[in-house]
């Protein structure tokens, strides 16, 4: 499969505190080496890596984060305040920056952000 390539743009994505967010960054990540990083005031931290069809989630995100290679979707559950901020997905022929913003809604629910 030949996935679409994300453009190097900054895209907003809203998430609800305590809810789940699904962020589709490409249509299929099979065959790609990817790194997702979150920007912090002191630099950046890695959220996950994809290499040789294996996803490695870093410890800080392990219990609430999944990345689905088959559809290029990042899932974060039980969204916390410190999840908001700028993230980047980097790999060969792909570079995407998205900003997750907390939306204060009366009802918890799942939100899908599609950048593919």
Image (cartoon, helix red, strand yellow):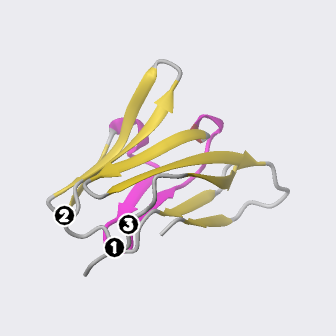
Q: Residues within 10 Å of mark 3 (few under 14, many from 20)?
A: some
Give the CA separation, mark 2 to mark 3: 18 Å
Name the residue that disc number 3 marks: 5
Name the residue that disc number 1 marks: 28
Question: Which residue is pictured at 55% across the width and 39% down the height?
Answer: 86
Task: Return the x and y of residue 101 as percentages of the image width and height.
Answer: 68, 46
Looking at the image, tell me whether mark 1 or mark 3 is earlier in sequence order: 3
Q: Residues within 10 Å of mark 2 (few under 14, many from 20)?
A: few
Q: Is residue 18 left or right of residue 48?
A: right
Name the residue that disc number 2 marks: 53
* Numbered disc in front, either 1 or 2: 1
Question: Which residue is pictured at 41% across the width and 67% down the height?
Answer: 26
Q: Which mark is residue 45?
A: none
Looking at the image, tell me whether mark 2 or mark 3 is earlier in sequence order: 3
Residue nearer the viewer, 94 or 37: 94
Task: Return the x and y of residue 105 as percentages of the image width and height.
Answer: 82, 55
Give the CA separation, mark 1 to mark 3: 10 Å
Q: Which residues are magenta?
A: 59-82
Give the CA separation, mark 1 to mark 2: 11 Å
Whether residue 82 is situated above or below residue 70 in the rendered picture: above
Question: Which residue is pictured at 70% across the width and 64% down the height?
Answer: 109
**Residue 4 magenta:** no
Q: Are marks 2 and 3 in contact (CB under 8 Å)?
A: no
Task: Return the x and y of residue 44 as percentages of the image width and height.
Answer: 42, 29
């Amino acid at each position: 499969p030949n996935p679409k390539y994300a453009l190097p743009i900054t895209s907003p994505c809203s998430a609800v505190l305590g809810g789940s967010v699904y962020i589709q960054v490409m249509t299929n990540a099979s065959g790609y080496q990817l790194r997702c990083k979150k920007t912090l005031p002191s630099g950046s931290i890695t959220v996950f890596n994809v290499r040789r069809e294996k996803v490695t989630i870093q410890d800080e995100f392990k219990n609430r984060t999944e990345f689905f290679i088959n559809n290029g979707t990042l899932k974060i559950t039980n969204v916390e305040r410190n999840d908001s901020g700028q993230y980047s997905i980097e790999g060969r022929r792909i570079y995407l920056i998205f900003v997750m913003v907390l939306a204060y809604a009366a009802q918890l629910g799942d939100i899908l952000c599609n950048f593919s």
